């Protein structure tokens, strides 16, 4: 690549651009982290004044078309189009016939249905076999002897009083009556197995070549494995089950195969075949090799695919795929088995497992496990020889909400789109080669001149009220909407753009030139392009001459240069710059955040200098006809968003605006942040999960740490993360420089807060011990549970099937300790330390010092669990250990009870002893 910045090193990189708060989309990072002082109701009424732009000039997108790389070999076409399909969920061919069976999800007041229809693309009729009122229906499979017995097995979720929470999963057997017409009697349900589940249900069932029934189950909750079921073996959750339904026992309508891997493990459910899964969505068995595959929905950053083998542990929720997630939780009795494949959330958000294709129609697909993604519509294939992956390819890039796959008797590969119906694979049409995708910025059709950085007519520059942190770079922004197409305006949600639109962002820094002087230098221009109803990002790196910019490769790049910094020696400092890969952008440009978090009415309702005229930006954009639904005119400003760096604005609004723009792209409902926080500006303080909340991850050695500790910035993990670069930094992606202005903003914001609970007393045993004799009396267990949760105990200790594993498991505490000993362990945590949780210090031959808990040890190595909950365990070679010593200090800081009242402390002790 020609001279892009000094030293560009190609490498995959997570990137997140703040100034337009988007995150790195595949290869670009755009998203003007926007904010805005919105006007309640719309634009200031000032029609008597001239507009910033007199009219809209036309820009045509003739060059930003297609992709830099060749398209995948397949696409999809819709089939069975003579019928309307409401929320299809699953499809499979009936053995021995030309019929297809399909599950339709409940929709628009209609119950879930199992229907049958002829495998004909033009079929006009379908038959309802059964209605499943009050149930969620996920999948079904046919008995190996279906043609003789007519047995079909359904996986459903239903409300039931059998389980706490009133919901559970059930696998049932029904009989398909085939004469005179296909039908199923709902009353003829034969329940095989059921279990409690109130969230991630799994939903896959299939018969193996061994005749056993395999079932995939989720962790049973809706977020972060709240029941901690992923690593336990005493329930059926987060697992693949294997049962024998051809034989029954006195207790159950099935038996457990004697060769199941956990049959002889005490307290383990014998039905378990493999475990450590979050939500294994779709399970399939290879009809030729017998291999078992699942697609597993990740939570925050990774989606995974697993070739399932007996006894394996896939790590959830200690790991998400191969990556640490909650390392303070205890890994199950088996080591982590890495996923067969994993995808970052930049390219997949909700993996759907599929089928192994062995049809005759597409020879190049044979032997591939075909799977896709619900959110991005991408479809991949993996071929595995039993020992290793021998091929992994992307086969199609669609706009479907993929929930399932099937192979028909004729060899068609079907894709189930939850939104509209059924599709089948077809070869990618051969399109006559037009101009290649622009490899230089000057070829994009956006610039009249890249040398002068002048845009073409019709490319509209715009500004935002609040910008996210972008390592101090100056950001310029433009939007290009093709022809006379219009934009969908929204005051609080991101605007909607037509296909062919481009959002452009150029980032510049004050860089040291060849004379040692500071000069503004364009580093990167990012282009966010909308095609086929999806956004995708591209990044262009500027050359030294500042005459043009080159398209950055798909896996990203890095550069290093010196930038002006008055606080650094000599007035300059080293700047590391990361150009995002094309797979990185969607980590922040997420569906959860609405893709374009900065482009809202609230964030763009501001005055702008148009040269000789200053006008309200939305007023001008409405005047030139940019919006198909222009905002109403109003003269009242709401001040919804403010510039966080403007010290004249309200302190609370500045802090909340900063969090909204910089953090809420991930820390939002269904977003990518793996902490239970929602930091959008519209979220109340109480619901943020930030103030006086205990960290779920690293405390960085801070005693009595909180995410935000009111009045005590030094005890606030939020401030610690903002003020560091490297492990644990926030924002986590790409930024290499601390935002010192933001650090001071949050130091002031936190310092001015008043805690809801203040220091009560430096408690001693003498203050509390006399009251222990009355623990059996008037004590509130509900209050004790609340203290256990809110004081942070639950983060480190497991109790009542909840909590972490940094500290000892507190189950059965009353059998092991007396009330006085429990109280003493909380007041003086270092007085007696459980040997299994003692901290040890290792000094290595290279001078490095490691501190942590010994997780396991062999003759050759020590595996050390770090104090950091976000760091993976460290393996130390014993041959390199110079010294090793136990520390007499507990990982639990002293003073944890000093903000509690006497009643709260005694209630907590009573709760732990019950």
Image (tube, rainbow, N blue to C red):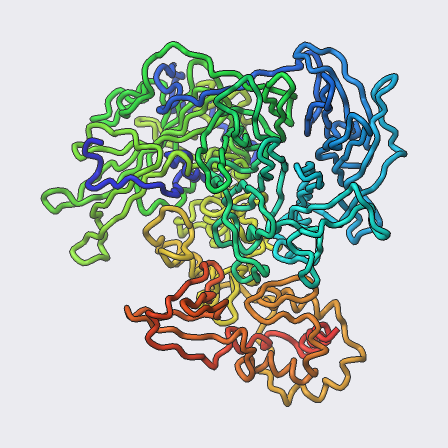
- Quarter of the image where the N terminus is located: top left
Who is closer to the viewer here, 534 or 410? 410
| Residue at (59, 63) in percent of width and height | 804
- Quarter of the image where the C terminus is located: bottom right
| Residue at (47, 18) in percent of width and height | 625
Left or right side of 571 for 867? right
Left or right side of 656 for 250? right
* Residue 28 found in image quarter: top left
From the top left corner, tell me how far across and down residue 414 is, in percent: 61, 22
Left or right side of 263 for 180? right
> Can residue 769 be seen by looking at this rendering?
yes
| Residue at (68, 70) in percent of width and height | 811
From the top left corner, tell me how far across and down residue 641 is, in percent: 49, 43
| Residue at (57, 30) in percent of width and height | 356
* Residue 102 found in image quarter: top right
Q: Measured along the vertical axis of the image, is residue 486 above or below residue 791?
A: above
> Can residue 650 be seen by looking at this rendering?
no
Q: How many marks?
A: 0
Who is closer to the viewer here, 710 or 219? 219
Q: Measured along the vertical axis of the image, is residue 572 above or below residue 289?
A: below
């Amino acid at each position: 690549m020609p001279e892009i910045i000094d030293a560009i090193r190609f490498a995959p990189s997570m990137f997140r651009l703040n100034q337009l708060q988007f995150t790195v989309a595949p290869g670009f990072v755009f998203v003007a982290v926007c904010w805005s002082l919105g006007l309640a109701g719309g634009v200031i009424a000032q029609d008597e004044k001239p507009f910033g732009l007199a009219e809209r000039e036309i820009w045509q997108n003739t060059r930003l078309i297609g992709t830099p790389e060749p398209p995948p070999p397949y696409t999809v076409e819709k089939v069975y189009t003579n019928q309307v399909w409401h929320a299809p969920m699953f499809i499979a061919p009936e053995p021995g016939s030309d019929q297809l069976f399909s599950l339709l999800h409940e929709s628009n007041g209609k119950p879930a249905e199992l229907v049958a229809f002829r495998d004909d693309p033009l079929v006009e009729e379908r038959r309802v076999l059964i209605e499943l009122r009050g149930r969620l229906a996920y999948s079904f499979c046919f008995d190996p002897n279906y043609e003789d017995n007519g047995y079909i097995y359904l996986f459903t979720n239903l409300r039931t009083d059998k389980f706490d929470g009133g919901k559970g999963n059930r696998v049932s057997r029904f009989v398909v009556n085939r004469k005179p017409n296909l039908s199923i009697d709902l009353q003829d349900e034969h329940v095989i197995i059921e279990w409690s589940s109130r969230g991630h249900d799994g939903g896959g069932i299939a018969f193996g070549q061994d005749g056993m029934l395999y079932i995939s189950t989720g962790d049973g909750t809706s977020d972060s494995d709240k029941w901690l079921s992923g690593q336990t073996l005493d329930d059926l959750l987060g697992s693949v089950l294997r049962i024998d339904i051809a034989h029954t026992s006195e207790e159950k309508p099935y038996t457990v195969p004697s060769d199941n891997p956990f049959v002889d493990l005490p307290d383990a459910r014998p039905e378990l075949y493999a475990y450590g899964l979050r939500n294994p969505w779709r399970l399939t068995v290879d009809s030729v090799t017998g291999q078992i595959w699942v697609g597993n929905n990740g939570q925050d950053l990774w989606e995974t695919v697993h070739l399932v083998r007996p006894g394996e542990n896939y790590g959830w929720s200690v790991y998400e795929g191969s990556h640490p997630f909650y390392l303070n939780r205890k890994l199950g009795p088996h080591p982590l088995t890495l996923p067969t494949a994993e995808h970052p959330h930049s390219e997949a958000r909700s993996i759907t497992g599929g089928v192994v294709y062995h049809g005759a129609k597409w020879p190049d697909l044979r032997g591939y496990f075909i799977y896709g993604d619900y959110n991005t519509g991408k479809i991949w294939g993996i071929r595995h020889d039993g020992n290793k992956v021998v091929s992994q390819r992307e086969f199609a890039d669609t706009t479907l909400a993929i929930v399932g796959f099937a192979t028909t008797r004729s060899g068609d590969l079907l894709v189930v789109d939850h939104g509209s119906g059924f599709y089948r694979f077809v070869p990618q049409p051969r399109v006559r080669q037009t101009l290649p995708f622009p490899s230089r910025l000057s070829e994009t059709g956006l610039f009249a001149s890249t040398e002068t950085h002048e845009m073409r007519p019709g490319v509209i520059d715009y500004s935002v009220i609040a910008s996210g942190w972008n390592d101090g770079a100056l950001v310029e922004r433009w939007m290009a909407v093709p022809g006379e197409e219009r934009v969908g305006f929204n005051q609080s949600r991101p605007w909607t753009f037509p296909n062919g639109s481009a959002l452009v962002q150029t980032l510049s820094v004050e860089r040291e030139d060849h004379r040692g002087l500071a000069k503004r230098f364009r580093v990167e221009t990012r282009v966010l392009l909308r095609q086929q109803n999806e956004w995708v990002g591209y990044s262009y790196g500027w050359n030294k001459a500042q005459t043009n910019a080159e398209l950055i490769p798909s896996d990203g790049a890095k550069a290093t240069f010196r930038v002006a910094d008055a606080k650094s020696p000599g007035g300059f400092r080293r700047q590391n710059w990361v150009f995002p890969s094309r797979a990185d952008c969607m980590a922040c440009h997420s569906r959860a955040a609405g893709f374009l978090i900065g482009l809202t009415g609230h964030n763009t309702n501001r005055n702008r200098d148009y040269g000789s005229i200053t006008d309200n930006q939305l007023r001008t954009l409405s005047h030139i006809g940019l919006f198909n639904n222009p905002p109403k005119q109003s003269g009242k400003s709401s001040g919804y968003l403010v510039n966080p760096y403007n010290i004249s604005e309200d302190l609370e609004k500045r802090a909340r605006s900063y969090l909204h723009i910089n953090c809420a792209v991930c820390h939002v409902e269904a977003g990518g942040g793996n902490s239970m926080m929602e930091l959008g500006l519209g979220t109340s303080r109480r619901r943020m999960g930030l103030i006086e909340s205990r960290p779920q991850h690293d405390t960085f050695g801070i005693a009595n740490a909180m995410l935000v500790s009111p009045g005590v910035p030094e005890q606030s993990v939020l401030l610690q993360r903002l003020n560091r670069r490297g492990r644990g930094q926030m924002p986590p992606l790409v930024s290499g420089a601390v935002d010192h202005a933001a650090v001071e903003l949050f130091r002031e914001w936190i310092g001015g807060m008043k805690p809801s609970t203040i220091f009560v007393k430096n408690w001693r045993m003498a203050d509390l011990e006399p009251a222990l004799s009355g623990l059996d009396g008037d004590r509130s267990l509900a209050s004790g549970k609340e203290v256990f949760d809110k004081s942070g105990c639950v983060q480190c200790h497991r109790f009542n099937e909840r909590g972490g594993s940094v500290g000892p498991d507190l189950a059965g505490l009353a059998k092991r300790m007396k009330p006085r000993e429990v109280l003493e362990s909380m007041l003086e945590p270092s007085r007696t330390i459980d040997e299994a949780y003692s901290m040890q210090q290792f000094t290595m031959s290279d001078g490095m010092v490691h501190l942590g808990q010994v997780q396991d040890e062999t003759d050759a190595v020590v595996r050390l669990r770090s104090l950091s909950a976000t760091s993976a365990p460290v393996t130390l070679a014993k041959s390199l250990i110079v010294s090793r010593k136990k520390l007499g200090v507990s990982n639990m800081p002293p003073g944890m009870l000093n903000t509690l009242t006497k009643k709260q402390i005694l209630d907590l002790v009573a709760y732990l002893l019950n």
